[in-house]
Amino acid sequence: MRDGYEKLRARLVEEQLLPRGIHDPAVLAAMAAVPRHLFVEEALRPQAYGDFPLPIGEGQTISQPYIVALMTQLLELNKEDRVLEIGTGCGYQAAVLAAICRQVYTVERIKPLLARARRTFDRLQLFNILSKADDGTEGWAERAPFDKIIVTAGGPSIPSPLVEQLADPGVLVIPVGDRDLQALTVLRKQEGEITSHIEERVRFVKLVGAHGWKAE
């Protein structure tokens, strides 16, 4: 879309993503198209395409563009996928997913954040995103199974309901670790077998819920 930020998005792809190994054409196209600046406060829009996270209120952040692209690439999306996102936040990650796959289901426990995200989804006419306010660590059982699941907050372990709601075959991407540092973990379900590997170390806000950290 033409909005005056096209050159900044193109530079983001060329300088932040390609040199770090983001190669999936669909992911690169989505990152070049989704207007990241619309997901942050107006005062922060000049910084929206910088190589760093930004605050979005309620003690939460919008992740660094590279991390958004990396987690999206690790999902190995195709256009027919149904994806569950845990942690809507400002909605940017959901918008990137929606640019690639058929349907996105996103869960956010902080209602003011979800309300703002929904307004942005409506503005961008992202009608393939369904959202609800709830404990994301419980997943979204009524809509399961999901081809792919992405968790945008760090938990002490992988919530069992998410593993149960993942289709076979399926891929789940989640940061797992302590409150300060996590391992970006990729879990695969294939023919009843579950395997996982660590991609890299990351820092995310806490995954709060029945199968995550307790609310403070």
Image: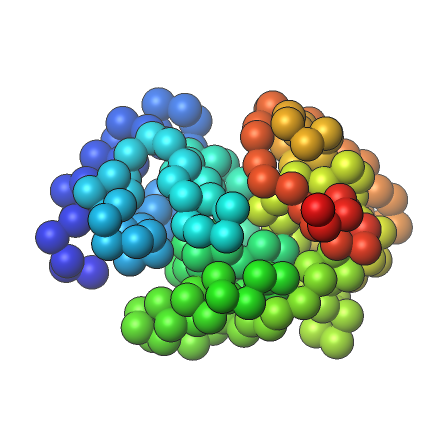
Which one is in front, 160 or 154? 154
Q: Residue 78: x and y, percent? A: 52, 56
In the image, is 104 to the left or to the right of 7? right
Which residue lies at the image location 30% right of the left edge and 73% below the top edge? 123
Location of residue 71 (image quadrant): top right
Q: Residue 77: x and y, percent? A: 54, 52
Does any portion of residue 133 appear in the rendered image?
A: yes
Which quadrant does the N terminus fall into?
bottom left
In the image, is 54 to the left or to the right of 89? left
Location of residue 193 (image quadrant): top right
How many numbered tags mark residues here? 0
Which residue lies at the image location 54% right of the left edge and 73% below the top edge? 130
Location of residue 110 (image quadrant): bottom right
Q: Residue 135: x and y, percent? A: 71, 62
Which residue lies at the image location 47% right of the left edge and 36% below the top edge? 67
Which one is in front, 52 or 126? 52
Whether 180 is drawn above or below 32: the answer is above
Does any portion of residue 75 appear in the rendered image?
A: no
Which residue lies at the image location 35% right of the left edge and 23% below the top edge? 19
**Tell me, what colour scheme is on the image?**
rainbow
Residue furthest to the left in view is 4
Residue furthest to the front in view is 216
Whether 101 is drawn above or below 174: the answer is below
Q: Residue 27: x and y, percent? A: 41, 46
